């Protein structure tokens, strides 16, 4: 059996990443920034995952991600009897494949403790071995000494917070010492509205990750348009340094299913940059043609408005679709505000983004 496993791994490693089909996720850039699709939380056989590190690179390449971080656990290594290596090894194995594929690989690890304070990821490390310390705060401080970007993982994970998602005194201490820069607002497909609120209140970076352990295709049906949860990073340049600068300055949004979660300034610009809108007016109606140039879907719901403008109750703008919306105008009305909520663009916990098209 061990011989079969070794042969399978050898065959996989022999397949050049560039021979695979590169995916492409079409999400617009923001003015002055490039939108990078990133997953900063995943596992391999070097902790409790089920795949070799190069597989994570190949998955990211096929899906169309720009950057990943393999964040194997420091404290939890159930395959340690079979795989003996340092905490740096998964990065070392993945790095050549990432360079060949044009994937930005950020060195990371997961500091894995009971709640409080729970699990935390450290990105942009130089030596993961230094995080292997008995005391949690010593591990976090060792990461900070390497100028790591630190974020709290799955704060609402029911295995650690079964009844209520709480902010503990230990988290306040981490925040005060500069040992927490962000929080996972989404982990896997689970959204944590409490974390969304904390990011807004405490000026923390919003993170969304897959936290994938099994092969990615066992969790998402890509043929049906599904995708992993990811962090959209609005970077000045498509490099590791560009990602770090954007994370430090909280220029991110979370992309999960049809949902985008983030600050309104970024979600509004994504919405506007995804769409081409044209209008034709007649004496009693306005014909609005909307072309969606992105992979994003937008769910619209009419909000309070001038009753003399008659238009949809609910409307969905599909990816790469062209839609014609007619707004009927009662006699004597020349125009006004078409008000609606984009329900799947969450600018506050469980609250969509209000938007107006002037006609």
Image (cartoon, rainbow, N blue to C red):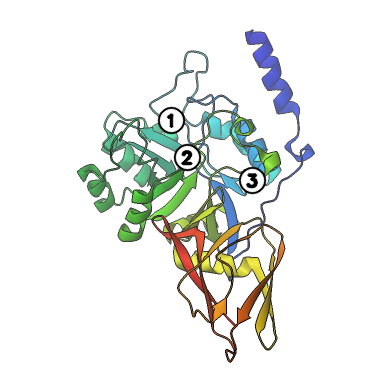
Counting from the top left corner in percent of width and height, residue 102 is at 68, 47
173 displayed left or right of 204: left
- Residue at the outermost top position: 1
- Who is closer to the viewer here, 49 or 342? 342
Q: Earlier in the sequence, mark 3 or mark 2?
A: 3
Counting from the top left corner in percent of width and height, residue 108 is at 47, 39
278 displayed left or right of 80: right
Image quadrant where residue 145 sits:
top left
- Residue at the outermost bottom position: 332
When the figure is inspected, residue 346 is found, relative to residue 143, above or below; the finding is below
90 displayed left or right of 135: right
- Who is closer to the viewer here, 127 or 55? 55
Residue 108's mark?
2
Q: Count neighbours of disc 3 (C-alpha within 10 A) and say few if under 14, some if 14 to 19, many if 20 or more.
A: many
- Who is closer to the viewer here, 145 or 245? 245
How far is mark 3 from mark 1, CA to CA?
22 Å
Image quadrant where residue 59 sits:
top right
Disc 1: which residue? 73
Image quadrant where residue 169 sits:
top left
Disc 3: which residue? 103
> Residue shown at 23%/47% (left/top)?
173
- Residue at the outermost front position: 331
Dot 2 lies on which element? Answer: strand
């Amino acid at each position: 059996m061990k011989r079969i496993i070794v042969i399978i791994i050898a065959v996989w490693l022999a397949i050049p990443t560039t021979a695979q089909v590169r995916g492409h996720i079409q999400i617009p850039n923001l003015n002055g920034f490039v939108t990078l699709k990133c997953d900063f939380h995943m596992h391999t056989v070097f902790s409790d995952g089920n795949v070799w590190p190069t597989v994570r690179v190949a998955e990211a390449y096929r899906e169309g991600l720009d950057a990943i971080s393999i964040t194997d656990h420091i404290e939890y290594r159930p395959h340690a009897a079979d795989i003996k290596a340092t905490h740096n090894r998964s990065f070392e194995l993945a790095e050549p494949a990432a360079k060949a594929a044009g994937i930005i690989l950020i060195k990371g690890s997961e500091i894995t403790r009971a709640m409080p304070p729970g699990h935390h990821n450290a990105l942009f490390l130089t030596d993961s071995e230094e995080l292997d310390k008995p005391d949690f705060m010593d591990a976090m401080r060792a990461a900070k000494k390497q100028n790591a970007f630190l974020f709290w993982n799955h704060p609402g994970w029911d295995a650690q917070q079964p009844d209520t998602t709480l902010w503990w005194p230990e988290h306040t201490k981490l925040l005060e010492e500069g040992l927490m820069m962000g929080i996972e607002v989404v982990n896997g497909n689970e959204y944590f509205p409490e974390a969304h609120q904390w990011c807004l209140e405490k000026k923390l970076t919003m993170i969304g990750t897959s936290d994938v352990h099994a092969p990615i295709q066992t969790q998402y049906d890509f043929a049906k348009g599904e995708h992993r949860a990811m962090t959209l990073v609005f970077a000045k340049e498509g490099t590791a340094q560009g990602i770090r600068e954007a994370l430090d300055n909280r220029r991110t949004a979370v992309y999960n299913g049809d949902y985008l979660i983030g600050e309104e300034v970024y979600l509004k610009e994504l919405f506007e940059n995804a769409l081409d809108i044209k209008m034709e007016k007649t004496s009693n109606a306005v014909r609005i043609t909307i072309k969606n140039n992105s992979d994003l879907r937008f769910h619209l719901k009419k909000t309070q408005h001038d009753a003399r403008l008659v238009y949809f109750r609910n409307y969905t703008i599909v990816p790469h679709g062209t839609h014609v919306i007619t707004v009927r105008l009662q006699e004597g009305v020349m125009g006004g505000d078409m008000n609606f909520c984009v329900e799947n663009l969450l600018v506050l916990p469980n609250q969509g983004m209000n938007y107006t098209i002037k006609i």
